[in-house]
Image (cartoon, rainbow, N blue to C red):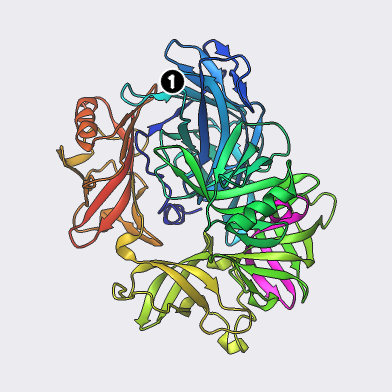
Amino acid sequence: MSTITRFRSALSRFAIYTCALLLAACGGGGGGSASPPASIGGSPSSCTDCGTAYIAITDADGDFLSYTVDVVSLKLKRANGTMVETLPATTRIDFAQYVDLTEFFTAATIPNGDYVGATLRLDYGNADITVEQAGAPVAAQALDANGNPMGQVDVNVTLDNRHHFVVAPGRPSLFTLDFNLAATNSVDLSTTPAKVTVTPALIASLDLIDQKDLRVRGALVSVDTAAATYVVDVRPFNMRNDRFGQVTVHTDANTTFEVNGTDYMGSAGLAALSAAGAGTVTAAFGTLTTATREFDAKTVRAGTSVAGAGVDTVIGEVVARSGDVLTVRGATVIRDTDGAHFARGRVQVMIGPNTKVMKGGTAPAQVSSPEAISVGQSIEAFGAATPVSSSAMSGDWTIDATAGRVRMNPTPVYGFVKQASTGALTLQLDSIAGRKVAAFNFAGTGTSPAQDADPANYEVATGALDLSGMSTGEPTKLIGFPTPFGMAPPDFDARTLVDFPRLPALLSLSWGAAGTTAPFSAQEPTSLVLDLANPSIGRLHFLTIGPRVLDLTTLPASPGIVPPAEGPTAYLIVMRDESRAFHDFSDFVAELGLRLNGTTAMVSMTASGSYNGDNNTLTARSIVVVLK
């Protein structure tokens, strides 16, 4: 993968968290004396001085279609040095699926007190990693810095004195882990299989700052219709067994339900969930109220409406359609019999007149027709999945959904503005749902072959969306649905628009293996200015805004890097033996001044936030620097 391609997809990679810390990887065991948790999976039976720790997993965007590794353990370190395990079993996670989602990992009952650190043990021995090359998914091998295959690795963190993870009775505490694929992996596509050099790292947070849906998945325990709540035994990801604690899910009159393929609203949905009975698999999507740690569900799915629960499911984007056959490539196949598989080959989804099609993004979901599913559509297809051959567990599949269901989900697209007028926008299309346009075949999308969607002139219906900020050549992001198959133009129906000033920006700069002792031309408590004339600047020197990539060394002046006026921030200094985090920009700059003493060198810097081209300023909510 070229440097430009790698950084073009990096525009939203950095999750921005309050009190964030970068976890530096070290090999071998966890260290310290370990003690088991008081209880994982229910109420404490013998611990009279315990509280509940909610631990959630997410990921910042990266260059991976799949990144599946085993999480062996997650131990929290108490102030007295003892380690407390929070996981009841090894958990297999595809971190690439959590770019737009945060998942409740566990709700562990552990001793009350201050926790000053954590150790996450990962096992790459059976890793399944997929990257994209020229629109096609290809396998990748995980290697360490010396070129050896990755095995088990421990990732450690020590929290700063002002921001310990405190567990106390009465209110669950929250700890969020972001497995930042972009910050921890370097991809080389020149070999077969592709090589991924791994330096495992995490960003840890004491709150949910990033605006993502939060998912709580698990088996139904009980329903309280009077309180409009239900309780689940947490089983994260696609796990079938083990108990990861209990969480109460709150609903209201606006909560949408889909139970065994039937839609409900509010109390009617809760009644249907209760009728489904204890043990029914559920997945709730919503938000966590910070003050009370209550999980409020916007959407609840249960029974066969949950991917892979009682019915096989394919999740991905339609890259081509021919008649009643949809082709999905780079998809996740979740079978009722044996769980999740990432399919690098082609998954052919068979649909027909009896296929039930639901269009999401509204409450309740709209009933649609099979003809509505077009190229570029993000879907979940429910039916019977079969590998094409016994050796094709990650290759070609078919799924028969002729008597099943397809859920159409709102789909994001990125592109560059070519023309804007009232109610319409024409784009140079760059990507769909994170996949480059080279992956898609738009044949048949138009009313005639001449009207098929053209990525070079992708026509978008924008309705009443405000296009006043659109300028020719600027990047933009739209969320909506491709036009029904065979009915373009327009090619896409946009429901949401993110214009240039609001697109996430990422500045990335390196100074080679030796680094530099003088990275800045100006270093003030309220701003930093990089020295772009520094001869040590390496091959990475880009500013990405959406799909646009700017070479920093070609700019007339270096962008100023400043903190936001308000809101959460996270500034990190990473060294060989430790990582230090700062909430305040001025403290971060002061520490840099002490560390950059003429002998210590800066190897790389990444800053995430928003870019203002008028004053050439990057407002950075997150900065990570690596020192040598």
| The C terminus sits in image quarter | top left
Which amino acid, mark 1? Tyr
Asked which quadrant contains residue 577, the reply is top left
Res 536 seen here: yes
Location of residue 439 in the rendering, given as x and y in whole percent from the top left corner: 59, 65
Res 30 seen here: no
Q: What residue is at 59 percent from the left and 49 percent from the top? A: 284
Furthest residue in direction right, as rendered? 390
Vertical order, 254 against 472 (above or below) = above
Label 1 crowding class (10 Å Cα cut-off): few <14, some 14-19, many 20+? many
Start and end of the magenta stretch?
Answer: 301-328
Q: What residue is at 39 percent from the left and 38 percent from the top? A: 291
**What secondary structure characterizes most of the magenta part?**
strand
Location of residue 579 in the rendering, given as x and y in whole percent from the top left corner: 37, 27
Furthest residue in direction front, as rendered? 226
Asked which quadrant contains residue 220, the reply is top right
- Give the camera-side residue of 2 and 76: 76
Query: Is residue 616 rendered to the left or right of residue 414?
Result: left
Vertical order, 15 against 486 (above or below) = above
- Give the camera-side residue of 54 and 572: 54
Residue 75 in the magenta stretch? The answer is: no
Q: Mark 1: which secondary structure? A: strand
Vertical order, 572 against 553 (above or below) = above
Q: What residue is at 63 percent from the left and 58 percent from the top? A: 268
The residue carrying mark 1 is 115
Location of residue 71 in the rendering, given as x and y in whole percent from the top left corner: 61, 31
Query: Is residue 565 rendered to the left or right of residue 298?
Result: left
- Give the camera-side residue of 494 and 10: 494
Asked which quadrant contains residue 512, the reply is top left
